[in-house]
Image (spheres, rainbow, N blue to C red):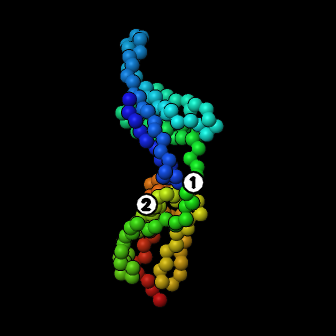
Amino acid sequence: MTELYVTNSLNLHKTVKFNLTLRYFVVKGYRGEHMWTLEVGTTHEAADGSIIPSARVHKIDTDNLDEAIEQAIAKLCVYIDWTPHVLDKEAPIVDSYSPINGSTVKINSNVYVTLREILPAAGIDLSNMKIYLNNSMQDIDITDEIEVTGDPYIYQIYWKPSLRVYDTYD
């Protein structure tokens, strides 16, 4: 059995302990199928004072173990009263970006930006995000051309121009 402690990013003063048990079974049958089962539970009370039921995940393999643990704990965390929440007052920050040279960027450069949320935080909401490119004459909306990876607390934004103009004529 393993103990795992979880803290909500909006309440860093409350931590809940979860117990993880991974069991290996040989199922009786024609070939004796081998199966891993994960059980996740907590003794913490639900928000209404009841017992939080344990979560069981069957037929786990080593490739999806981390994902199975994360999903099982997330399923149990909805029962917990995480209040009082800390107010998320800070906007996310630009942690890094490339290229660094503002006015001397080569035409074949791609753009990378990392946005980071500093805890305690609710996470970065990308639903209303707009990305504009300023070419020193106008702002161009490139929101539909970017690729975004990451999670709500750190996102990597990548833009590879679909058209690169190397020459201009008057």
Q: Residue at x 54, y 41 (%)?
A: 77
Q: Is residue 62 above or below residue 134?
A: above
All told, the count of numbered labels is 2
Q: Residue furthest right?
A: 48
Q: Quadrant of residue 66?
A: top left
Residue under label 2, please give it: 156
Disc 1 residue type (three-letter): His
Secondary structure beneath label 2? strand
Q: Quadrant of residue 104?
A: bottom left
- Between 12 and 132, the residue placed more toward the observer is 12
Secondary structure beneath label 1? loop
State yes or no: discs 1 and 2 in contact (Cβ < 8 Å).
no
- Between 144 and 40, the residue placed more toward the observer is 40
Upstream in sequence: badge 1 or badge 2: 1
Category of crowding for the residue at label 2, using alpha-carbon neighbours closer than 10 angstroms: few (below 14), some (14–19), many (at least 20) = some
Residue under label 1, please give it: 85
Q: Position of residue 99 (x, y in %)?
A: 36, 72
